[in-house]
Every structure is written in C-alpha cells, then in structure tokens.
Image: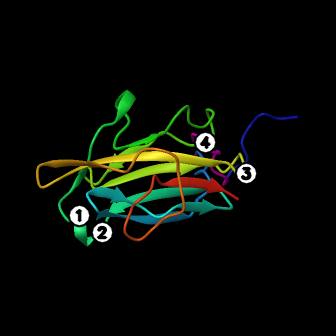
Amino acid sequence: MSTAKKAGKPAKKTSARKKKAGPAYPELQMPVSLVGGYLSVPDIQLAMPAMIVLYFDASLAGATFNVLRGGSPGFAFSGSGPQTGEFGKPATVQAGKQVQVMDNCITRNTPWPFRLAATYKGKAYTTPTGAPTLASARTPTPPIIINK
C-alpha cells in the first residue's frame, strides 16, 4: 500500500466544519397599543414553537420598551413565571421598538401572564396587573401566552 498521491489529483483540503443553522421558527408579530392609559396586547395562543415579536402600533409611534424587574427588557412574566427552558430570554431590538421572546412551546394549556413596560412621550406605561380575565375592548387586561 503506497502513501504517495496519485498524479493529477489535488490533495483534499481539510476545512473547518460549518455549523448548521438551527431550525427557522415562525415569527408571531403582536401589536402593542395604548388603551385607557395602559399598554394593551391581544392574548397569544401558540400550538408550536415560535418567536413572539411585540411591536408598537401607530397609537404608540415613537415609544420604547423599558426595563422591568430583574433587568428584563420591557417584558417580564407575572408571578413565578414558567420553568427554565419554556421560553427564551426576552430581548429588545430595533432601538427598543420591539421585544422578542422565543416560546419553545413545552407546557400545554397553561396561561403565562406577562407584563410590558414602555415610555411614550416622556410618560411610563405598563400592561395592567392582576389576574387575567376575558378581554374587553375598553378595559385592557393582563396579557397571557397559552401553548395549545
């Protein structure tokens, strides 16, 4: 067995392994509006993993998300919140105009209430606090995420 290379064939180059990109998850874009002095967002229901993108609608043009408890950027779960791994770490993007959080959709049929905080025209606004209730067009309620 010869270790010599055959003439006319270039030697194989060893290249660094390319990392495969992770799976592309769908984005769920959810508008945040100002209703009755509170930030309002529709309840979110997902049946599969997705990136949740919260953005300001026209009623909040120029607003930015604020930091909530524990340094969370404009988004925090109410109460004890979900277990580690259920959701990714929230992040603000586009100079504070959006909050993104990955929902890994692990636990089913459990409501996850959350809070938002933002500044608009120099005034701080949040989503309502308290227990989630059926939403009304005139009175915003604490928003929830439910994995179906």
Label 1 Cα crowd, 10 Å radius (few <14 / some 14-19 / many 20+): some
Query: Which residues fall within the magenta stretch?
Result: 8-18
Disc nearest the viewer among 4 and 1: 1
Position of residue 109 in the picture relative to residue 19 (left or right):
right
Give the mark, 4 or 3, whose residue is nearer the N terminus: 4
Q: Main secondary structure of the magenta part?
A: loop
As measured in the structure, the alpha-carbon distance from the residue carrying label 4 to the one carrying label 1 is: 46 Å
Disc nearest the viewer among 4 and 2: 2
Q: Is residue 8 above or below residue 85?
A: below
Give the mark, 4 or 2, whose residue is nearer the N terminus: 4
Please name the amino acid that badge 4 sits on. Arg
Give the mark, 4 or 1, whose residue is nearer the N terminus: 4
Q: Nearer the viewer, residue 95 or 119?
A: 119
Residue annotated with mark 2: 57
Q: Position of residue 125 (x, y in %)?
A: 25, 49
The part of the image, by quadrant, that contains residue 120 is bottom left
Give the mark, 2 or 3, whose residue is nearer the N terminus: 2
Q: Is residue 129 above or below residue 1?
A: below
Residue annotated with mark 1: 60
Label 3 secondary element: loop
Please name the amino acid that badge 3 sits on. Arg
As measured in the structure, the alpha-carbon distance from the residue carrying label 1 to the one carrying label 3 is: 32 Å
Name the outermost residue toward the left.
122
Residue annotated with mark 3: 108
Position of residue 81 in the picture relative to residue 2 (left or right):
left
Residue annotated with mark 4: 17
As measured in the structure, the alpha-carbon distance from the residue carrying label 2 to the one carrying label 1 is: 6 Å
